[in-house]
Image (cartoon, grey):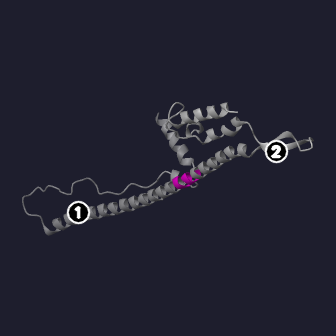
Amino acid sequence: MNGYSDDLDSLLDSLEYEEYEEAAPSRRSSVRTPSRQSSFTPRQTATPASQTQVQSAARNLDSKIETLSKAVQALETRTNSLSTAQDRQVALTRKEVADRRKSTDATRSDLQQTKMLAVLLPLLSQETTDATDDQGRPVKVLTQSQNQLTTLLPLLLLMPEYSGGEGKGGLGGGDSTMMMLLLVILLGRK
């Protein structure tokens, strides 16, 4: 198992991440911290500490405080850079969402226009029929289509229940029942 993880690590290290900044693993060194060894050293004698011993202990503590201060600054710098990168990603995500919303709205608009044209086209279509003029000669005449089914079926495209929109009633309820009844009555009339 250990050999497998070593192979995986070497493979990941060999990959070049320059092109993919966000995918590049962070190779930051660990933050330097003071040793965990206590600064207090017990003394063998009961005599008070000398000036030199107190100064040495103070320098030791000052050194540890300075190391911790630098570590806090390094962590703050890293946190700020991560926050900036995250803000950048949030802005890019918001922009992408807005672009997708625009694209979706444009597609919906185009689809609605297509539906309207599909409804209007049968109403605008004309048929050629044979007729006779005043002298009894046969002539070709353009007339409105008499096929009511061809005229009315595109109207179903505009009904949400049939066009895939978010209708309330479905086939059995609401306005669709009235539309079906109207369609049957109109088709039954000649």
Q: Is residue 144 above or below residue 33?
A: above
What secondary structure is found at the residue carrying circle 2? Answer: strand
Q: Quadrant of the C terminus?
A: top right
Check disc 2 and report the residue beneath it.
142
Q: Nearer the viewer, residue 121 or 46?
A: 121
Residue depicted at 50% across the width and 36% down the height: 174
- Where is residue 118? Give x, y as percent: 68, 44
Q: Main secondary structure of the magenta part?
A: helix
- The type of residue carrying mark 1 is Leu
Q: Which residues are magenta?
A: 97-103
Dot 1 or dot 2, earlier in sequence: 1
Mark 1 vs 2: CB contact within 8 A: no
In the rendered structure, the answer to whether residue 7 lies left or right of residue 131 reads: left
Q: Nearer the viewer, residue 118 or 70?
A: 118
The label number, if any, that marks residue 61 in the structure image: 1
- Where is residue 146? Give x, y as percent: 74, 38
